[in-house]
Image (tube, rainbow, N blue to C red):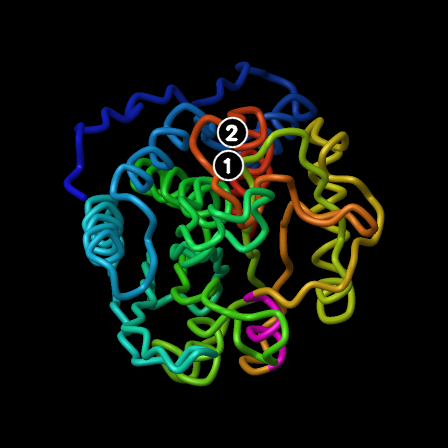
Amino acid sequence: MERKNLITFFIGILMGCSLLACQSNASEQTQTEQADMPVVPAFCADSSYAFIKAQTDFGARVPNSEAHRLCGDYLVATLERYGAQVINQYANLRAYDGTVLNARNIIASWNPASQNRLFFCAHWDSRHICDEDTIVSNRNQPVMGANDGASGVAVLLEVARLVSLQQPHVGLDIILFDAEDYGHGDVENSFCLGSQYWAMNPHVSPYNAKFGILLDMVGGKNPVFAKDQVSMHFAPDIANFVWDRAAQLGHGNVFVPTQGGGIIDDHYYVNLLAKIPCIDIIHYREGVGFPDTWHTTNDVLENIDKNTLYAVGNVITHILYESR
């Protein structure tokens, strides 16, 4: 599908801090402490929302489709425009039903020479079937994936825009995994094919990062982000740190400080195969499950909440710019 509109993004963010002049030693010390405080740029939910629209304007991004190819090109061009060094990692991955998926992991790096780095990740493909739809006749349709896929990518594209304006103190990789959602619940390891491939074949070898944060379904209404069991098994200190920081920033109502269920998501394979601690921020609650739009025809732009995008984006922006 051809893009219908050019998206105008917010490009003017006023950042800065002022220090009071002082004469005494005590005030000079205060001034020094203030100067050392990180300046965290403002995350823009409107911009992130526009990035979701830009993706969904292509249609469902199912691997092997024209919409998938065009959206991949758009993501690469956008990340390069924001100053990233981009690697396309192509792979032919066999799905549970025998389909060979022409997959494309997209890795964007800033300050790639730095050994002191973080990575943020999300999957950019959308599911080939709406198998959870309540209307049986809809179940063979592809999922638009405004939340399940596009929302995590959109938050990371807004982070990339901020990095183009203000470099953090650490190196950053944004990894967009492909072929996450072309799986079957009864077939072991059939989901997250792109992250499995990357974890066994990192874009640089050896690849090292202090930790990673995965974003999945981070734009829906009335979200609950609990600490899933995989995150708490492999990286409990990081999960606790992120949820504590979210509460300090005023987002404790959505970053609920309880343990969620066991979820096999991209972060599982990053932890298991790449041996890099990675946590998941995902809309899922034990006993309730995923949001109602999950794997249905209702996973569309109209069901995205900018407040959710802001909460998640604000937290990871602070994590990035406060890191040393």
Q: Give the magenta part as a residue range.
A: 266-272
Q: Which residue ends up furthest to the left in the rendered image? A: 2
Determine which quarter of the picture holds residue 164: top left
Q: State yes or no: discs 2 and 1 in contact (Cβ < 8 Å).
A: yes
Q: What element does badge 2 sit on?
A: helix
Could you tell whether 239 is left or right of 50 in the image?
Answer: right
Describe the element under mark 1 as helix, strand or loop. loop
Q: Position of residue 86 (x, y in %)?
A: 25, 61
Ranked by sequence position, the earlier of labels 2 and 1 is: 1
Q: Return the residue nearer the eye: 12 or 33.
A: 12
Residue annotated with mark 2: 303
When the figure is inspected, residue 240 is found, relative to residue 100, above or below; the finding is above
Dot 2, crowdedness within 10 Å: few (<14), some or many (≥20)?
some
Please state which amino acid type lies under the numbered disc 2: Asn
The answer to whether residue 72 is left or right of residue 233 is left
**How far from the left and from the top, in percent, is residue 219?**
53, 36
In the rendered image, residue 78, in percent from the top left (x then y), is placed at 23, 45
Q: Nearer the viewer, residue 152 or 95?
A: 95
Q: Residue furthest front?
A: 137
Residue 89, above or below 317:
below
From the viewer's perspective, tell me whether residue 218 is left or right of residue 117: right
On the image, numbered disc 1 is attached to which residue?
A: 298
